Image: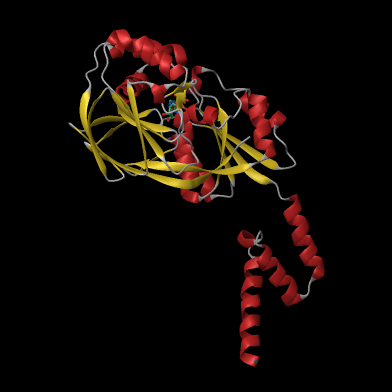
């Protein structure tokens, strides 16, 4: 019995030591242990009060070029409408491709619990990849051109309302996926999509109109390719104009490639756009804008968890709309409920 008690006190002692370290000051068990061990009621109350009054450190990473609009006033605007009783905000602008990821990684290693991607799907990808790695919480302010994931999650485009969503601080878990180890949260793919995002990234003009103009120009020169797919053990050979692996349902701007997709079903929708004569382009656009891809004979959609895609040669892919080069063989895996995100 003595030995059991000694062990118990040793455990309490180690927990109370933990409680004294600032890093674990949030552990209620450790605080309770401190209280039991030292019978220090005053300190216990102080700890609880400290908890009640601790504001969450929140970092807003703002992409100054996403969506093609100036963002100089965004920090002041956020500061005005953010609930300061709950949050202690910081702001930083990304300065180059990949910088948002570096900033998010740095913030997660410091004491930021919530990191907000203020931009489009490319910015979300950089920030969310780090949020996922460090198991923090992602916030989204939709300031991109398409805002596919934000639209899927019903995060308002109106900035004041989007800040209110953060103020309410409702957290949900959504699926993420990997495309040859690279995380994505909205859509990733190859074929025409990837080719277009590679060209779009080099173009100075951002925003929807720039994207549409480029799309129309590029579509005339693009040749469909042959693919072999293995989806959860079943093999398919297809010639395709594009293959999109969808976590959410849309590219952005309410253009739906996978109307039945959900970020909470633990599945990915493999969308194969078949080769088509250019005269059918308006029909394809109509089908996607009306959210009717599933009923169209121009698009085949197969759901799965583990997907392998072999193409003719290595080349362009897109990960949440951002271009990248990858090998001819690509492995896609879903990671159910892996990302914590603030939702309306
Ligand atoms: N200061 C910067 N200068 C140039 N590029 C940047 C800068 N900061 C971030 N980027 C890059 O901008 C790219 C586009 O960002 P993002 O996807 O958020 O905007 P978008 O393409 O306008 O929106 P969406 O993806 O929703 O259509 C990302 O690849 C990101 O790495």
Quadrant in which the C terminus appears: top right
Residue lying furthest right: 42
**Ligand 1's quadrant:** top left
Looking at the image, which is closer to me, 332 or 71? 332
The colour scheme used to paint the residues is secondary structure
Looking at the image, which is closer to me, 162 or 43? 162
**Residue 320's x, y, as percent?**
41, 31
The mark total stands at 0
Quadrant in which the N terminus appears: bottom right
x 49%, y 34%: residue: 124
Q: Is residue 310 above or below residue 191?
A: below
Q: Is residue 318 visible?
A: no
Residue 323 lies in quadrant: top left
Looking at the image, which is closer to me, 100 or 263? 263
**Residue 193's x, y, as percent?**
33, 23
x 45%, y 11%: residue: 209
**Residue 192's x, y, as percent?**
30, 22
Relative side of 186 to 44, left or right: left
Q: Is residue 153 above or below residue 299?
A: below
Q: Is residue 231 visible?
A: yes
Looking at the image, which is closer to me, 243 or 15? 243
């Amino acid at each position: 019995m003595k030995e059991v008690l000694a062990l118990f006190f040793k455990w309490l002692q180690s927990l109370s030591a933990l409680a004294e370290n600032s890093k674990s000051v949030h552990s209620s068990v450790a605080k309770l242990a401190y209280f039991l061990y030292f019978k220090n009621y005053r300190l216990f109350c102080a700890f609880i009060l400290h908890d009640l009054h601790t504001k969450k450190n929140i970092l807003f990473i703002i992409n100054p070029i996403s969506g093609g609009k100036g963002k100089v006033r965004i920090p002041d605007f956020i500061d005005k409408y953010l609930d300061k009783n709950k949050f202690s905000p910081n702001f930083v602008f990304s300065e180059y491709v990949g910088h948002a990821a570096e900033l998010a990684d740095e913030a997660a290693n410091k004491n930021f619990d919530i990191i907000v991607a203020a931009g489009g799907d490319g910015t979300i990808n950089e920030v969310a990849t780090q949020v996922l790695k460090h198991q923090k919480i992602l916030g989204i302010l939709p300031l991109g051109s398409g805002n596919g994931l934000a639209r899927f999650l019903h995060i308002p485009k109106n900035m004041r309302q989007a800040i209110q969503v953060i103020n309410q601080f409702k957290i949900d878990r959504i699926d993420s996926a990997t495309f040859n180890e690279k995380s994505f949260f909205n859509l990733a793919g190859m074929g025409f999509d990837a080719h277009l995002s590679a060209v779009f990234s080099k173009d100075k003009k951002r925003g929807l109109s720039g994207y549409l103009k480029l799309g129309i120009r590029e579509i005339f020169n693009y040749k469909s390719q042959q693919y072999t797919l293995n989806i959860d053990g079943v093999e398919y050979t297809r010639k395709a104009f594009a293959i999109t692996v969808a976590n959410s349902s849309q590219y952005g701007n309410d253009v739906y490639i996978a109307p039945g997709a959900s970020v909470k079903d633990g599945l990915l929708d493999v969308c194969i756009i078949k080769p088509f004569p250019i005269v059918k382009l308006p029909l394809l656009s109509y089908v996607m804008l009306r959210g009717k891809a599933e009923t169209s004979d121009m698009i085949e959609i197969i759901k799965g968890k583990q997907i392998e895609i072999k193409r003719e040669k290595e080349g362009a892919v897109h990960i949440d709309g951002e271009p990248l080069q990858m090998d001819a063989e690509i492995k896609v895996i879903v990671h159910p409920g892996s990302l914590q995100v603030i939702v309306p």
